[in-house]
Amino acid sequence: MRAWFSDSGRRVEVFIPSRRWLRPLMGRCCQACTPRSWDGFYHAHLSSLGFRSATWVTEEDTRYRGWLVRRICFVLAIGGWKVLNNIPGDLLERVCRNKRVQDLAASKACGCRGERKFQQQCKEKVLGILAGIQAPLCLPMLRLCCWALLRFLSRLFLSVQLHRGQLEMVLKAARTPSVPLVFLSTHKSQLDGMLLSFLLFSQGLGVPRVTVGNLICSSRLRALLRCLGAVFLPTAVEQALHDHDGELPVAVLASYLEEALRSQQPLVIFLEEPCAPWHLSGPARAWLALLYRAMQDSAVPDVLLVPVGIAYDCTPDRFCRDGEVRLCAAPHLGVGASLLSPHSCFLRSPPQQSAQPLSLGACLWAACRALCRCFGCARVDLAQPFSLQEFVAKSLICRSSMGKPLEELLPTILGMLQPDYSRADGPEHRMTTSSEAEEEMMVTKLGLHALTDATVCSAVTAVGITSALLLHKHRKCVRLSQLMVDFAWLLEETLLRQHDVSFSGQLRALVLHSLALLRDHVTLYYLAPFGDIVVVIKDSAETRWELSRHSAQLVPIFASEAVGACAIRALLLELLPFVGEAPCPSSITFSEDELHQKILALLQLLPPSLLGLKPCQPLDCQSQDVLDKLVLCRLLEAEEEGERYLCDVSSRGCSTTPRWTNLDFSDSDSDDNHCKRCFRICKPKDSPGFLLFFCHLLSPVLATYVRAVAFLEQHNWPQPEATCARALQQFLAEDGLGEREHDGGGPPAPVVLWVEQGRGAALGTSLFPERPMWSLALSTLQSFKNIGVLKERPSPSGPLLQLVQPFCSSEGREKLRDFLEQFMQL
């Protein structure tokens, strides 16, 4: 079956597998946390509004028509873009009049408050701090850089897609009087800052202020970014934000943010670091805390938050020489930059060496190198705006438990008795009611909620689907015809789960386009007698890391099925010594209690942001949702009443009311003596290997956790978390590179096929092998802290990570390794 979708202003034929599909409705806000925002601004027919490419500029985007206009339409279009709002001209006076700024300046300045000398000293200090934070927009430089950026993006990507319905929804929200827009975005590349700034400016939303962390750059580049709209976080603001008294830079930054919100200046906050997805970064917490305080102090009546998801076929920021930091393609061209720290970059030199400042010349050289290749397509998704005021009010009123306490997983690992779960034992019920703890809880919940929304609304790329198939289903090689069949199958399953894709085109062209972008990690052999192509995956650590990085975007889509499949695998491993070789998996039944127990254990282990799960949803509800989805995709089938199969572990009677919920079934007709439901494994005919594929989907994360157990034995404790994370990443890199690569047979003289996809799809040199993702190291340490393997110990120099006593012995670490390995598909 074939259908038609609009792409870049033109009609493109799209392959649709076996059923009639429409574009799914994506980006709906949480109905539990923001029920009033659920029906606001959301267009009822987003799927019928089509797509457009932000880099496809024609004479239709100008007021003029004609032969000459078609050749200079870029210049005319950019000249017609309006800067809607800007920081007021008397910003310095407004900041100086802020009561908190005056009080802090008075405590540090000499003289009395009424003296002219004090006022001058206060003004000079505030002016110096404010100049390091932002600068007035330079409109001529802004339009010049936008013109250069438009030409650069049109060469770098085949298209930069944007949904017309999502844009209409955000434009409608921007017209709300006295309510500013704040975009909370994922961070996939160092290119994101200038891409979002260009896109919002070109679509009539104004020039946004893009928040930047401690960017290590030269003074010239820093000054250029400030006049183009970048807002820098002052030094040591993250630590000062947790101080009750505060510091003068924090007060100036807070006052500046209040004035920016009052003038309805759009603001962009990146929730994560490019190399550490799924984790709420420290600078993001600082900006969200300032935003929360501004609304609490009634600087603005409300703030509309817009989660933003960004997807690339291939991220364009992975260029470096020996000993250099991986720089962004051209950060100087946009109005924003992203967080850049020694932890957010991979160095060829040892980790203890500091990164060199990012200069303007280095950015220009990186841009020239990036133009030698094509990075496929990019896609930006705008989720439904929701009210910050409603989110805070709902969270304060409904302090519902987030699920089973994570600390209770430790007895399960060590083989101890596990207490019964009760909602009253949830972490929120044990929290203090101080304002600092309440603010920290609210900022964390808001950040994780927005990060989950932005991750879920991100479209899936063709490279992500192909990488997942090559890594998790075809480990060695596969024929192109079979890869196309599996691509169509996985595409169909993705659309079934209400997730959109960022590509269109014929099936064969899509698969070959993905293989062309993965050309450093695969080899294609042409089979002349059969007219087919064999795709051989290179057996190297670099290839596994790269494919794992691309396929990670499918984890939030199939997270429930992957968790359920790993739970089934753990149950089968427990039953294997008792049943021996079973006739077939369908002859084994599992009780509902056993499945829920394994699912809950895995949900407690993995971070919710990695799985794309709502942080507001209790773990018992998530566990039930996992089980329901396993039944829905026909991996499990409910046993008929009265049936019994080999190794029936559900023979004991129990109540139909699950013990992990406190729902009242007193008025129901349920019988307490009735046996609980049982399930048996099924093999869907139209989805062969479905269960194994889901088991493999979480294997990169679980394998990292298992390898980190050996790190616990070799590392010296206690250590700061940042030092420990760098050491863990180095340990994982040495362990991965130390694996022996197998030399396969294969044809002696390969005929390599590359498919040119549009402009700039030239063959490039192989990139330096990237170390394991920083996010996996952070995720491992965070999970080990949550389950009680590591704990924080205060010290004068800051918190230190300490290995708890049960895991200081080899016996405790062996139990931890066995607990982790039960969920892995070996």
Image (cartoon, helix red, strand yellow):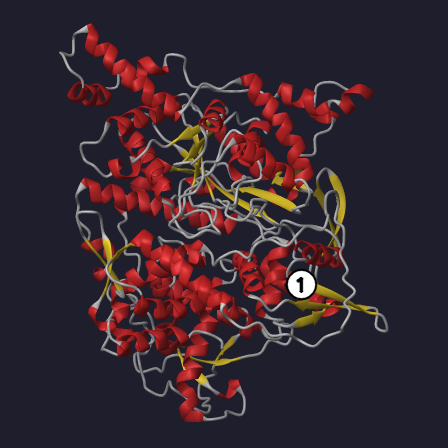
Residue 49 seen by the camera: no
* Foreground residue among 427 and 512: 512
Query: Compared with residue 274, is residue 91 higher up or lower down, i.e. above or below?
Result: above
Q: Residue at x 75, y 59 (%)?
A: 508
| Residue toward you, 324 or 656 | 324
Picture quarter with the N terminus? bottom right
Q: Which residue is mark 1?
A: 522
Instruction: Name the residue: 31% across, 77% down.
Output: 815
Total numbered badges shown on the rendered structure: 1
- Where does the image place residue 364, in percent across and percent down from the top left? 59, 33
The reply, left or right, for residue 725 in relation to residue 549 is: left
Horizontal arrangement in the rendering, residue 826 relative to residue 302 (left or right): right
- SS class of the residue under badge 1? strand
Judging depth in this view, the residue of 570 and 364 nearest the camera is 364
- Asked if residue 806 shows in the view, the reply is yes
| Image coords of residue 182 (percent x, y) | 43, 33
Residue at image position (28%, 33%) is 293
Q: Is residue 728 left or right of residue 488?
A: left
* Residue 534, image x, y percentages: 74, 69
Residue farthest to the top?
Answer: 116
Whether 479 is drawn above or below 442: the answer is below
The amino acid pointed to by label 1 is: Val
Q: Is residue 751 above or below residue 756?
A: below
Kindly indicate the quadrant of the structure image that contains residue 600.
Answer: bottom left
Q: Residue at x 36, y 30 (%)?
A: 302
Q: Quadrant of residue 479?
A: bottom right
x and y, in percent, of residue 412 in the image: 28, 74
